[in-house]
Image (cartoon, rainbow, N blue to C red):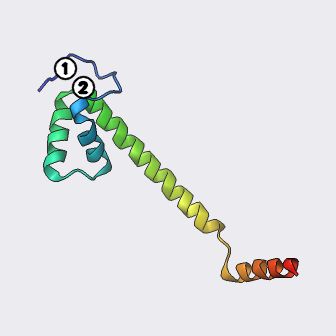
């Protein structure tokens, strides 16, 4: 299927497809919607490029979020350290 003569350089998908492509990329599309979006994107350079870019972006954001959560966990104080901090605060408030 070839829906457009476009080269795929455009960042804009077909207007009627944007929501379906976003839901397909983020994994929230029902099976039939996902099938339709992927089928359309396979034959439409604009939508194919959009779907690839959005899927890649979501994956990269997920990786960043996971890395940040791991670093936050590593930076958390142990319960013993928290008790020490809270004792220090209590002492400072006196």
Q: Earlier in the sequence, mark 2 or mark 1?
A: 1
Mark 2 touches mark 1? (CB < 8 Å)? yes
Name the residue rendered at 36%, 36% in the picture. 53
Residue reaching furthest to the front: 94
Residue 20: x %, y % from top left: 23, 42
Q: 19 left or right of 59? A: left
Determine the CA span between mark 2 and mark 1.
7 Å
Disc 1: CA contacts within 10 A as few (<14), some (14-19) or many (>=20): few
Name the residue rendered at 23%, 50% in the picture. 29
Residue 72 vs 58, above or below: the answer is below
> Label 1, on which residue?
4
Residue 49: x %, y % from top left: 30, 30
In front of the other: 47 or 18: 18
Name the residue rendered at 26%, 46% in the picture. 24
Residue reaching furthest to the top: 5
Q: Quadrant of the C terminus?
A: bottom right
Tell me the element at label 2.
Answer: helix
Residue 9: x %, y % from top left: 34, 21
> Label 2, on which residue?
45
């Amino acid at each position: 299927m070839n829906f457009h003569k476009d080269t795929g350089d455009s960042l804009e998908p077909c207007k009627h497809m944007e929501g379906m492509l976003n839901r397909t990329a983020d994994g929230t599309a029902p099976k039939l919607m996902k099938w339709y979006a992927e089928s359309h994107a396979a034959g439409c350079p604009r939508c194919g490029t959009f779907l690839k870019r959005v899927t890649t972006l979501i994956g990269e954001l997920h990786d960043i979020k996971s890395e940040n959560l791991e670093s936050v966990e590593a930076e958390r104080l142990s319960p013993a350290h928290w008790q020490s901090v809270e004792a220090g605060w209590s002492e400072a408030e006196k």
